Every structure is written in C-alpha cells, then in structure tokens.
Amino acid sequence: MKNLNLLHDVKITGVEKKQRVEVEQMLIPEIERIKSAVGTGYETPYASINLPSDVRLIKDIKRIIAEKKEKHKPTMLIVIGIGGSNFGTIAIHQALNGLFYNEQSPDIKLYFVDSVDSDYVQTVYQFAQQELDAGRNVLVNVVSKSGTTTETVVNFELFYELLRKKRPDNYQELIVATTDEGSKLWRLAIEEGFTSFHVPKKVGGRYSVFSAVGLFPLAFIGIDIDKLLSGAGAMVDLCTQHKNPAATSAATIFAQYQKGRTIHDSFFFSKQLAGVGGWYRQLVGEGLGKEKNLAGEVVNVGITPTVSIGTNDLHSVTQLYLAGPHDKFTTFITVQKGVDVRVPTLPQFEGFVANVQGMAFDDLRSAIVGGMYRAYEQKKRPFMGIEFQELSAEALGAFLQMKMLEVMFLGFLFDINPFNQPQVELYKAGTKEILLARRS
C-alpha cells in the first residue's frame, strides 16, 4: 500500500493469524464478485468501484469548472447537501486544505450548508449576500441523490431565492445540481437551465465521494482529483486480489465483533482527519446496521462506529477505553510526517517536561502514539493501526477506497446488504407526516 501501512499483528489485534486467515478465506467469493464488476460500469451493487476510472466524468467536471471560473469568477462556493452528499467532500477538503481554509483568504471561500440550524444557515446566507452585494459571484452546488431530501431542499430554496433576487439575469448559471437522473431536482435543473451532474443510481450516497458529488466541489477549490483518484484506483486493484488490506481489516474487525466487541473506535491522531472520521461513521452506521439479513430474517446486527481525535481525546475518553467495558476494538490512524514545527529550547522551561526541548512535533506525536500502543497492550485492549506516511491526495484516496471496500466485505460477512438504508427512510417519512399535519 503506497503511502499507507497497516499494522495488524496478533500481539496487538488479539486475533490469531489462523482465525484471521480463515475469515479472509471466507471473503474470496466476494472478492471475486467485486473483481468481476471492475470496468463494467454502474450496473452492479459494487458500482462505486468504477468511479475512479470514469475518464469522461473527470473531463466533464474539469470543463465545467473552467467555464464557470472564466465566465463568472465566483469567490464563494456553497455546497448544499447532507449525509453522503457532503460527508466525503468535507473529509477530503479538511484533510488536504486544513481547518483554516477560509481564514487563509483563498480565491474561493467554501461553505457547507447541511442542516436546518437556523443560526448557522443565516450566517452563511449573510456571507453570500455580502459577496453578491459587493458585485462578486457565488456558486451554489446543491447535492441530493433523491432530489427530495428535506434539509437539502429547504436550504436550496433559500439560496435559490437569493440568487434570483441578486442575479435575476443569470442566476441559473450560478447553480450546479448533482442528483439522480430523473429525480425532481434533475427535472428542475432541466427546466431552469442549471448545470447538472447525475449520480449513477446504484452508487449510494455514502459510496459517492468519487462521483461528481465530491469531485466537482473538490476540484473547484483546487484539490488534485487526478491524484485522489489515482490512489483510489490503485486500492481497487490491490483489493481485488485474494490477500488485501481491506479484507485483512474487515476480517480483524469481524473477528473482534464475534468476541463481543461491537464498538469500533477510529482514533485519528490528526485534527485534519476529523472529517474523515465523520464520513467513516456514516459508512459503517448505515452500511452495517441492519435489522434483517439477506434471507429476510431478523438479526439486528451492526457495529457502533465511534470517532476519537488525538491527542485531545487522550484527555477525555482514554480512561474509559483502558478501564471500561471490553466492548471496543480500536483502529489508530496516524500521520508520520507533517509540517516541521519544533519545541523551542528555552531555559525557563527546562525541567517542566523532560526530553522535549528542540524536539519536532512529529516526533512528539509519534512518542505519544507509541505510549498509547504500550498502554493498550498492557491493558489487553485490542487494536490495529493505519499509518499515513503523509497526508497527500493519493494516500487519502487510497484510504477512503480501502474503507469502502472494507465495509462491503463486512456486509458479506454479516450476510446483510451494505448498500441500502431502509430505516433512514423512517425519519424522513415521519418528518413529512408531521409537516403535512401542521399544514392541515
């Protein structure tokens, strides 16, 4: 795995090699099914694995971005979506652009509108209004596979109205819709003349980050999507071999689940990867939390995904993880190389903390991670690790693709469908019933 290293020896995972290999052998038929789907387009449940090699899509995205920038020179991009429609975009943006993107005064400010939090939405609305009043342009990318997601629709109406009011002559050119072909949003885009991208129907939202859902806004703000997709494509190639990192990770997590460790904590030692944690939480929660198996039997299975951020959460939840119930399995995700920041050598601080004067922060972080590994081993708390050599587009693309394949493999092991989310529709139906009742 270029730029990624998986740590999974018996000593730390608590899973004997023989047991892990047995589970990996169980996955071979599924690996073969996925392999047979490579290069076949978007007609199978595994459709998302072909996104990284969709040359036509990439070309279309780059062309439209160039046209929008040349003609309108937008200074703000607002992505309106929720769940799978923006978790992946946020994850990659934060990981590669950092947490202070807008504060660094880039050419294009980026905001995500993904809830009905009135205070937050109003603030973004005011920012957009200020840009438009100053004579600058704002581009709105509305993202919804169904085209009828409540939160997305109401937020889009708000910004659609703003653009119509402030740019009555060309507001249509400042809107990009990403949705399923044939959806209500798709039809509106055709009627109004919005630029639109369609998401293949068999690519679910949580697997859509390498479709136009993620690629359009990411490329618009300067992310190198070619490198991102190169990493993802290489991981698809690697994980269609019988022995591969996604299968090893899935087998280890599944073996621990069978031992009663139903909580999987992803412990990221990088603030910039917090968004990746949110993306993975949805992937696991929606992908594996299922009431029924493929035979229609009630099984109520699933892994509870939690996310911790180091080193902050060493001072919040580590006490629980090391002393509490033995119901958790942890994957530590670390970055070996970051920006070169060093502890100053100041005589006033000698003796405060031993052996840190002049040390690189990367080395200090490595020591802390090593200390955590030792503590987990000492307390017999099982874990594995994934090491990024550095946070690059290629490595991140590989990591996200590996995790999507990991969840597909876990779905097979649980004998459930990792591509649907029937219970999510319950809250949507309930919301619509309440809204209808209030109108009556």
Image: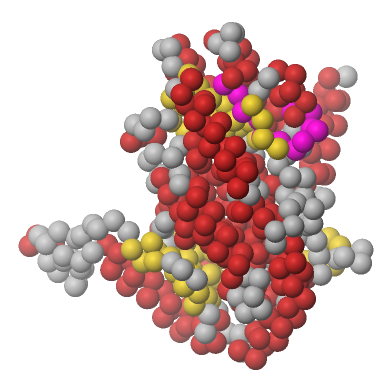
Residue found at x 69% / y 25% = 154
Residue found at x 64% / y 75% = 241
Front-most of residues 393 and 85: 393
Task: Name the colour scheme.
Answer: secondary structure
Q: Position of residue 276 (x, y in %)?
A: 53, 54
Q: Which region is colored magenta?
A: 174-185
Find out whether residue 178 is within the magenta segment.
Answer: yes
Find out whether residue 317 is within the magenta segment.
Answer: no
Q: Quadrant of residue 131?
A: top left
Front-most of residues 414 and 261: 414
Q: Position of residue 166 (x, y in %)?
A: 54, 10
Give the position of the C terminus as an image quadrant.
top right
Up/down of 368 relative to 159, above or below: below
Visible in this render: residue 285? no
Visible in this render: residue 179? yes
Q: Is residue 177 left or right of residue 345?
A: right
